[in-house]
Amino acid sequence: MSIIKDIKHLARVMAIGVFPVMIFLAGCSDTVNVDNGAGQSVGLMVDGQDSIGPVNDRSFISAASAIGVGALSLSPQSNEVAGFTNGRPPKYLSTPWTSGGDTFNLDFRPAIGIPVTVWIIKGPFTEQRQHAIEACIRTSAIWHNERMGVIFSPFNIIDATADPEASAHYAFPNGDAGDIVWKPLRDDIGFVAGQLNIYWVDTVNGGTGTGWSNFGAQIAMGKNTGDELLSHEIGHAFSLTHVDSDANFNIENIMHSASNNRQYATEGQLFRAHLNPVSILDALYNARPGELTRTCNYSNTATPPCPAIQKRLWADGGFPAN
Ligand SMILES: [Zn+2]
C-alpha cells in the first residue's frame, strides 16, 4: 500500500465522514441572546424537544449574553422560553425550534412602574406614614431580589386621618365578604382609578397585624402589620394564592398567610403574577402591552405551557432549584 493511497483514503474519510458530523453538531446547537438585562445573572426556563423527547422547563442560569440551550427541535407540546433577571419583568418568548441551529432574541423590558396610592385612615399620620414607607422599601427589596421586575412609581401617601368618615373605617371586616365591604372605602375615603389603593386602618378582620386584598385594586392594612406583609397582599393582587398547605413552601415565601419572614417568590409564582390576565399588572395597569397572557392555576405539576407553582431557577432558602 503506497503512502499516497493512504493519504487519499484519509482525505476521503474526512470529506464524507468526520467533516459532515462536525457540521451536524454545530448546526443543532440553539442559542438565546439576552438583551436589556441589568447586568445580573439570567435564568431561563426552556420548552422544546431534544433527541429523547419533549423538554419542559429545562433550567439555565448564565451571566453570558448568548446562552446555549442545547440542541432543540419543534416539540408537539410547547416551544418557548421564559427569562428571569433582577430589575426586569419576566419575559416570555415563543421559540419555534427547527432541526437546525436556531437563535432567538430575548429582550427584557424595563422594570414595570406601578403608581400606588396609600390612604392613612388611622393615625398618628407621621407614624403610619413612616410605617407605609418601610413597607414600601421592604416590598421593593423583595421584588428586586426575587426578580419581580416591578417598582412603585410613585408611592403616594395621603393623610385621610382628618376625614370625618375616617373613624367609621378604623375596623375593616373580613375582606372576602365581597364588594359590600370594599365599596364604602372608595366612596367615603377615596379611590384613584387605575391604581392600587392601599387603606391603612386600625384593625383588619379583628387584628392590627392583619391585611386583606380584594385581588384587585384595593388592599386594607392593619395598624401594626409587618413590613413584609405588603408583598403578600400585593401578591394576591398579582393573582397569587396561599401556599400554606403545600410542602414545597414554608413561611419564607411571600404567599404564606401567617408569617413575619416572607422574602421569597418562585419563578412559578413570578410567571403567574405577570401572565395571569386577572393580575392587576394586566387587568388594572395594562403594564404588559403586546405581551402574552396565560391563565395558569395553582398546580404542583408542570402542565405545559404552565410551570409548576414551586418551579425555582434559584434556591429559596432551604428549597433548592428544581
Ligand atoms: Zn393572604
Image (cartoon, rainbow, N blue to C red):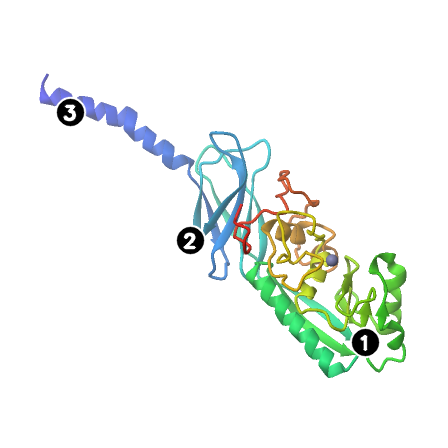
Q: Quadrant of residue 230?
A: bottom right
Numbered mark located on residue 7 in the image: 3
Residue bearing the label numbered 2: 64
Residue, far left: 2
Side (left or right) of 76 relative to 61: right
Task: Indicate left or right for 294 with 122 as reference.
Answer: left
Give the quarter of the image for residue 154.
bottom right
Q: Going from the N terminus, do you reach mark 3 or mark 1 first?
A: 3
Quadrant where ligand 1 appears: bottom right
Mark 3 Cα-neighbour bin, 10 Å: few <14, some 14–19, many ≥20: few
Closer to the observer: label 3 or label 1?
1
Q: Residue at x 75, y 65 (%)?
A: 196
Q: Is residue 11 visible?
A: yes
Q: Label 1: few (<14), some or many (≥20) within 10 Å?
A: many
Q: Nearer the viewer, mark 2 or mark 1?
A: 1
Query: In this view of the protein, which residue sits in the foreground, 292 or 164?
Result: 164
Judge by depth and name the residue closer to the eye, 34 or 234: 234
User: How far apart in space, not on screen, are marks 3 and 1 (Cα)?
Assistant: 90 Å
Identify the residue at horizontal 29%, vertical 30% (top origin).
19
Q: Residue at 17% across / 23% down in the picture?
A: 8
- The kind of residue on which mark 3 rests is Ile
Residue 121 numbered tag: 1
The residue tagged with tag 3: helix, strand or loop?
helix
Q: Is residue 111 visible?
A: no
Which of disc 1 and disc 2 is earlier in sequence?
2
Q: How many marks?
A: 3
Say which element carries label 2: loop
Image coords of residue 118 (percent x, y)? 75, 72
Which callout, 3 or 2, points to the residue nearer the camera? 2
Task: Find residue 251 and name its label.
Answer: none
Residue 240 horizontal side relative to residue 88, left or right: right
Mark 3 CB near ligand 1 (8 Å cut): no
